[in-house]
Image (cartoon, rainbow, N blue to C red):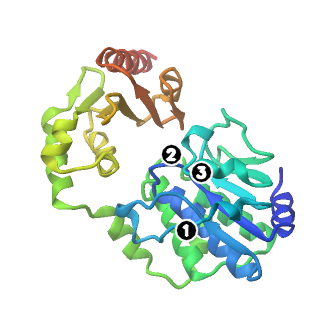
Amino acid sequence: MTFNQILEKIKTYDTIIIHRHQRPDPDALGSQLGLREILRYNFPDKTVLATGSDEPSLGWLSKMDSVADSAYQGALVIVTDTANTPRIDDERFERGDCLIKIDHHPNEDPYGDLLYVNTQASSASEIITDFAQKTGLELTSEAARLLYAGIVGDTGRFLYDATSPKTLRIAADLREFDFDFAAISRQMDSFPFKIAKLQGYVFDHLDIDENGAARLLLTRQVLEEFDVSDAESSAIVSTPGKIDLVQSWAIFVEQPEGYYRVRLRSKKVVINEIAKRHDGGGHPLASGANSYSLEENEQIYREITEAVAHANTN
């Protein structure tokens, strides 16, 4: 579908409810809340709500709305930055009258009545900005702040390969608005002392093979020792990549239910196919998966080592 089709659909509904993925990152919140701000400003007579669990570590971005079940009656539901339905935060997303998916992940789960998926975009926040610009919707400084934060978050402050010339042009357009852009970078670059101590644990316990395939296991005991939640542990996901030898890595985070949340990252070697084989998916160089035993952890790491070794021989 096109941006104009999305806009026409928005115009036909009085209530719009925006969802995003569970355990939100800056792009999930930036795209969701940035779109909320744009629609509220351009359509003041509409009810525009954002739903999902609040993430305390990202409270500086904005807060969620309280959405009653009755609000979904006859509503338009938009889901941003979410590749598949199991990851959508707030299971009520199917209760609306119409569902639109706006995303930049590979379209493995083409859910929704209408879809706009652009895997060339750096982030969902880039797509939302592009949508507003191309349909003539006005942005506010608050919308620009949220969308800029989303782009900065998903590009690693413009370090990752997904950063395109278009990404930089859109970021520059957002910078024309009045918000403290430097504060966003400072916020993303700072972390509590307990995370700094956990980073030390990463460097001490990271397992790296001769080709640069690395892994780390964070047990419940380790998380409790450092007083770090599963969500907070995401702050160290990029830490192994700071080591020059490391090419691809997996961080296995033990969950209260006994399974492992697996965060997969890579500098060049594509790893999302590995994620797909283990109840996950994502971008070629940044994916997530689930492992249901220590043996499956070993299997995932073997697949990473094989992928890195194969890349090194070509």
Residue named by callout 1: 66
Q: Nearer the viewer, residue 62 or 54?
A: 54
Amino acid type for the residue under numbered disc 3: Asp
Residue sticking out furthest to the front: 70
Q: Position of residue 298 (x, y in %)?
A: 31, 16
Alpha carbons under labels 1 and 3: distance apart = 21 Å
Residue named by callout 2: 161
Which is nearer the N-term, disc 3 or disc 2? Answer: 3
Is label 2 in contact with label 1 (beta carbons under 8 Å)?
no
Which is nearer the N-term, disc 1 or disc 3? Answer: 1
Label of residue 81 in the image: 3
**Viewer-nearest of labels 2 and 1?**
1
The structure residue drawn at horizontal position 45% and vertical position 28%, both measured from the top left corner, is: 269
SS class of the residue under badge 2? loop
Alpha carbons under labels 2 and 1: distance apart = 37 Å
Q: In which quadrant of the rendered view does residue 67 lie?
A: bottom right
Q: Position of residue 259 (x, y in %)?
A: 35, 28
Up-down relation of residue 49 to residue 280 (above or below): below
Amino acid type for the residue under numbered disc 1: Ser
Q: Is residue 210 left or right of residue 135?
A: left
Up-down relation of residue 25 to residue 139 (above or below): above
